[in-house]
């Protein structure tokens, strides 16, 4: 039996409502997954936000204010109050300092996204080394990039291969101002990665070797990260070498990854300093340190 015109309209509306409901549910699922991947606890904060929002009855501007602020409040409580306690007591991890003059994140998103946790032993080594650098070179700040998430030994910190256990961290290079030749804090890259100190003529060229052997990802970041600030920053081999030497003298540090041409250029001889392999990404824009 066929449907009448009015019945067809009702059927169409019902199908449309079902589709919109499915689409909203799918968006919520994708949001939970994305926030979990990026921040580890953002997905949980989003689920709690949706649950509480349904139970708080507000209208007008109060409802809009709730939508803006409720997630931020929940996420902040999880990230900055609960996580440090859980990470320390269960996983032996500690959040790196945020405002310390000697050691701080290059970009605040590292802190906001919970990517600044390390094993307590690594914390001590980093802070001691950075403090010594500041004592030897006044006003020098050591900037860290990605470390690890606070929870679990297997949760990946994308896009890294191995930053999943609290035992690894990336540090930015030191730079000088190309005009004044004075020490220059910061980095030529907004991301902290991707602006490289490339091999000179005659130096070992692993980026070229890896590219020729099909590892397209090896220099990918250099192609996508803006390079317009590179001319204002000159790689500082003196301070960078001294920092690496301080790190290698610690019995707690097992490996440091840096490009072979920089190891040779800075005359670094420690067996702890190694090539990371073409399957990774180039390391002439940062220093990888691990226990």
Image (cartoon, rainbow, N blue to C red):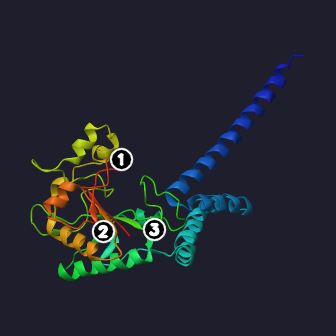
How many other residues sit within 10 Å of disc 1, few (<14), some (14-19) or many (≥20)? few
Q: Earlier in the sequence, mark 3 or mark 1?
A: 3
250 versus 221 height, above or below: below
Residue furthest front in the image:
271
- Please state which of residues 144 and 120 is positioned toward the viewer in this rendering: 120
Number of dots carrying numbers: 3
Q: CA distance from mark 3 to mark 1?
A: 21 Å
114 versus 19 height, above or below: below
Q: Which image quarter: residue 231?
A: bottom left
Q: Position of residue 72 (x, y in %)?
A: 55, 64
Q: CA distance from mark 3 to mark 2?
A: 17 Å
Residue furthest right in the image:
1
Q: Which image quarter: residue 18?
A: top right
Looking at the rendered structure, the secondary structure element under dot 2 is strand
Residue furthest top in the image:
1
Where's the N terminus, which quadrant? Answer: top right
Residue 97 visible from this viewpoint: no
| Residue indicated by mark 3 | 166
| Residue indicated by mark 1 | 279
Looking at the rendered structure, the secondary structure element under dot 3 is loop
Q: Position of residue 270 (x, y in %)?
A: 22, 68
């Amino acid at each position: 039996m066929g449907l009448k015109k009015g019945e067809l309209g009702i059927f169409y509306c019902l199908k449309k409502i079902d589709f919109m409901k499915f689409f909203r549910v799918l968006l919520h699922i994708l949001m939970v997954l994305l926030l979990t991947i990026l921040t580890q606890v953002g997905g949980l904060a989003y689920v709690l936000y949706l649950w509480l929002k349904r139970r708080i009855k507000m209208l007008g501007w109060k409802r809009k204010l709730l939508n803006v602020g409720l997630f931020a409040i929940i996420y902040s409580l999880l990230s900055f109050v609960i996580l440090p306690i859980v990470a320390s007591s269960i996983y032996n991890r500690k959040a790196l300092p945020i405002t310390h003059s000697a050691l701080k994140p290059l970009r605040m998103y590292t802190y906001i996204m919970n990517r600044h946790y390390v094993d307590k032993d690594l914390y001590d080594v980093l802070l001691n080394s950075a403090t010594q650098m500041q004592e030897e070179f006044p006003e020098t700040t050591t900037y860290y990039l990605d470390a690890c998430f606070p929870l679990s030994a297997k949760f990946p910190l994308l896009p890294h291969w191995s930053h999943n256990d609290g035992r690894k961290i990336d540090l930015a290079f030191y730079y000088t101002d190309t005009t004044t030749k004075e020490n220059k804090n910061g980095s030529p890259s907004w991301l902290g990665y991707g602006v490289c100190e490339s091999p000179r003529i005659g130096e070992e060229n692993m980026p070229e070797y890896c590219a020729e052997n099909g590892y397209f990802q090896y220099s990918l970041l250099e192609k996508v990260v803006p390079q317009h600030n590179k001319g204002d920053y000159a790689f500082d081999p003196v301070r960078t070498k001294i920092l690496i030497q301080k790190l290698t003298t610690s019995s707690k540090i097992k490996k440091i990854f840096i490009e072979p041409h920089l190891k040779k250029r800075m005359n670094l001889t420690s067996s702890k300093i190694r090539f990371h392999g073409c399957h990774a990404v180039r390391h002439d824009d940062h220093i990888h340190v691990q226990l």
